Image (cartoon, grey):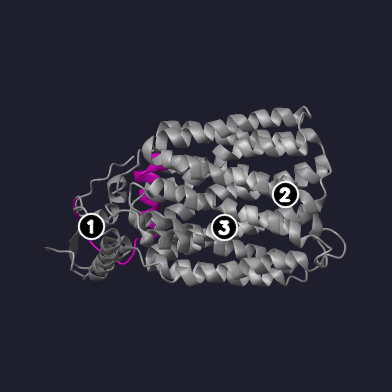
Amino acid sequence: MATDDRADARSETITTSVPARLDRLPWSRWHWTVVIGLGTVWILDGLEVTVVGSIASRLSEEGSGLPVSAAQVTGIAAALYVAGACSGALFFGWLTDRYGRKKLFLITLAVYLAATALTAVSFSSWWFFAFRFLTGFGIGGEYAAINSAVDELIPSRYRGRVDLVINGSFWLGAVGGALLSVLALDTGLFAMNVGWRLTFALGVVLGLVILLVRRNVPESPRWLLLHGRGEEAERLVADVEKRITAEKGRPLPEPAGEITVHPQAAIGFGAIARTVLSTYRKRATLSFSLFIGQAFLYNAITFGFGAILTTFYDVPSGSTGYYFAVMAVGNFLGPLLLGPLFDTLGRRIMISSTYVLSGLLLSVTAWLFDGEHLTAKTLTACWCVVLFFASAGASSAYLTASEIFPMETRAMAIAFFYAIGTAAGGISGPLLFAELTETGVVADTTLAFQVGAALMTLAGLVAAALAVNAERRSLEDIAAPLSTAAPTGARS
């Protein structure tokens, strides 16, 4: 027997307008709290990845305090970081769907903080490698917990641009990491075995600040509904509505429609696998393709950019951060400026065009590099243009996986495609790229560029055929929850 949205028993159904009420909210200070509390962790990820790439040459020098080579830092350490992220995404993704978004986005940040702090005091290579893995483990969990929470709290008409900017904020951290590495590697300021440790310590400080803000972000009302906590979801949304009404000084528009669900404690792995890989197999193919393309491009090139500059253009190790900072700015501007188009022109045209265009531009860059027509500055300029489009496309991969599958599977879907795609491109990429750039042979590095370009272009063609028109639609309309009494979401 159905009950209204005040029902709170898993044995009954809940008919509620909570999702529609969230989607019709105007942008407010409350939404900024969500974005700052949850989205800023990507800045930490960008800081982490960039710092390691920038300090690779310094760590390999005698007197750094660690007996490692540059290839080990950009290859083994990078691959372990990504392997940790894949493992963490799967582990914490399952827990996120089972125990809630808020519990997990607090736990995953705590894991990151502890591992980063212990990286800063590394005294041997095995310690450094172990805690690079655990740092990635925490960050991987963040991807699943944060993307699912953000999409469930942000109104549908803003979801695309907000998700892209949040994921693209990785590059704000990259700018900070690049400039910080320049400062930290200056032996006139810090001893050779101290400066690189301070860069990791700063990540801990920033993480603690984010943790304080994040404590004010609520649980997802959508998750509460599907776990039989309808009254709690109702109170939470009512409180948000009251605050926004007071802020705007006018009544809110009426919500459009209701949804009826059968609350349940958890969905098993079998049901998740059948839903994602069978019921929505075309969407699974789309997500897998997008993650493969962006993971290989970004993990391979990002970790090896500093090595390219020092190997082929004799840029001093202490100056590579300047070049990376310029490139990172181009990366952030892509999602920032192109993000609104994902909500207006639509997902299909924007996802496919950003992937294909970045792939074609990367092919041109590879040709110029192979012909030795580039300098350190012009190569950086080419990368800025390529990654302006690639960054928006890469961010849309996370948006896609988080919005096109039923809510009960959302965190696990993000985790699964992130882990599979990143394992294929993100682990093999750094290992292969470190090996290729270490040879000092132009043709070897060109090959890595060409592989990345081909995978991005192919992913764009898949998106042109399979992308879902999810712009300005509620999550429940894009993919009805498995527990919906009368499913309405189109499946493909």
> Residue 239's x, y, as percent?
27, 68
Which of 105 and 329 lies nearest the eye of the viewer?
329
Is 389 drawn above or below residue 66 in the view shown? above
Is 126 drawn above or below residue 152 in the view shown? below
Residue topped by disc 1: 250
Q: Residue at x 77, y 47 (%)?
A: 307
> Mark 3 vs mark 1: which is more N-terminal?
3
Quadrant of the rendering where the C terminus is positioned: top left
In the displayed structure, does residue 415 sit left or right of residue 73? left
Q: CA distance from mark 2 to mark 3?
A: 18 Å
Amino acid bearing label 1: Arg
Q: Nearer the viewer, mark 2 or mark 3?
A: 2
- Check contact, mark 3 vs mark 1: CB within 8 A: no
Q: Is residue 266 magenta?
A: yes
| Mark 1 neighbour density, 10 Å: few (under 14) some (14–19) many (20 or more) | few
Which quarter of the figure has residue 69? Answer: bottom right
Residue topped by disc 3: 43
Q: Is residue 78 visible?
A: no
The span shown in magenta is: 257-283
Q: Residue at x 80, y 58 (%)?
A: 58
> Residue 230's x, y, as percent?
23, 67
Residue topped by disc 2: 322
